[in-house]
Amino acid sequence: MVELENLGLAETNGKDGKHKIWNLTTAGQKALADGNELPARPKASTGAKAVRAGFGPHGLAVTDTILAYTDTVLRGRREYLTDWQVEVNHAIKQTGLSFNTDAVLAVPTKTSEVRLFELDNGTMSQALLAKEVWDYERYAGHRVWEGARGTIGGTYPFWQRHRYTRSKTFPRLHVVLAGKAEHLLDNRLQALTAAVQGITIAVWANTLPRLQGGEPWYEIGVDDPHERRARYPEAVGR
């Protein structure tokens, strides 16, 4: 972040305790928008306004997650981080589904262009956290018709045609748990694993302390496009 500050792309805007709160400058936002194909973020849970609204600790934890992922998971590998955005909205107008992803990291591979990150800083109920994870399956399962109304045609995944067009598989979701003692995070991880059993998207979970220590992820969901297609067989609005 200091390097971005020296380039005039980032700035500090207050503190949360001893930690600086970082946000992109106007030039940084423009550079981010011009330099990648991810949708522009509607808002970010960083900066002075977010701190006053109570999102400061969450924003810091998201930043810590991105740094830990790049420092431990990506270090020494062929895959590398080319960009990132926070608070990225995913919405399907026809169904009313809408949610924000805490962070989207551009890590291009042969099958996927991004990695999705959800962070729970110990503030959500277990039921709400599980619902947020299932929302990703609902988003991945939504299909739309190709061709004009009244013509004969097939359906295709909404996300693959309108969002992550270079991805062959739905991006893997990474759930990171933070904000509580390690034994409590373990309890939340076990509860989440049980709550999303049978989900048809790839979901990896970890605690922030373990991620920072370079420990492996827990695979709690496996990508299964065939089962997902059976679960969400009809496109809405035809």
Image: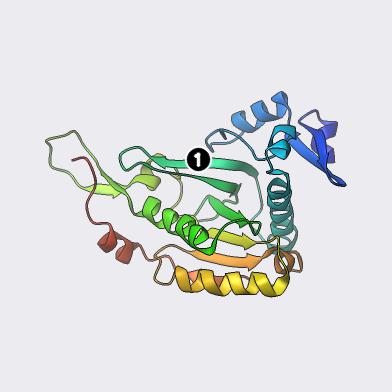
Q: Amino acid at mark 1?
A: Asn
* Residue 216 seen from this side: no
Q: Nearer the viewer, residue 176 or 53?
A: 53
Q: Quadrant of residue 94?
A: top left
Q: Is residue 173 above or below residue 219?
A: above
Residue at the farthest right position: 18
Q: Nearer the viewer, residue 132 or 113?
A: 132
Residue name at image x 39 percent, y 71 percent: 198
Judge left or right: residue 102 versus residue 57: left
For the C terminus, the quadrant is top left
Crowd rating for badge 1 (residues with CA inside 10 Å; few <14, some 14–19, many 20+): some
Q: Nearer the viewer, residue 125 or 199?
A: 125
Q: Nearer the viewer, residue 90 or 7?
A: 90
Residue name at image x 70 percent, y 60 percent: 179
Image location of residue 228, percent across then percent down: 32, 62
Judge left or right: residue 171 versus residue 66: left
Residue name at image x 53 percent, y 36 percent: 37
Judge left or right: residue 80 versus residue 110: right
Image location of residue 102, percent across then percent down: 59, 48
* Residue 6 seen from this side: yes
Image location of residue 164, percent across then percent down: 45, 45
The residue wearing badge 1 is: 89
Judge left or right: residue 143 versus residue 98: left
For the N terminus, the quadrant is top right
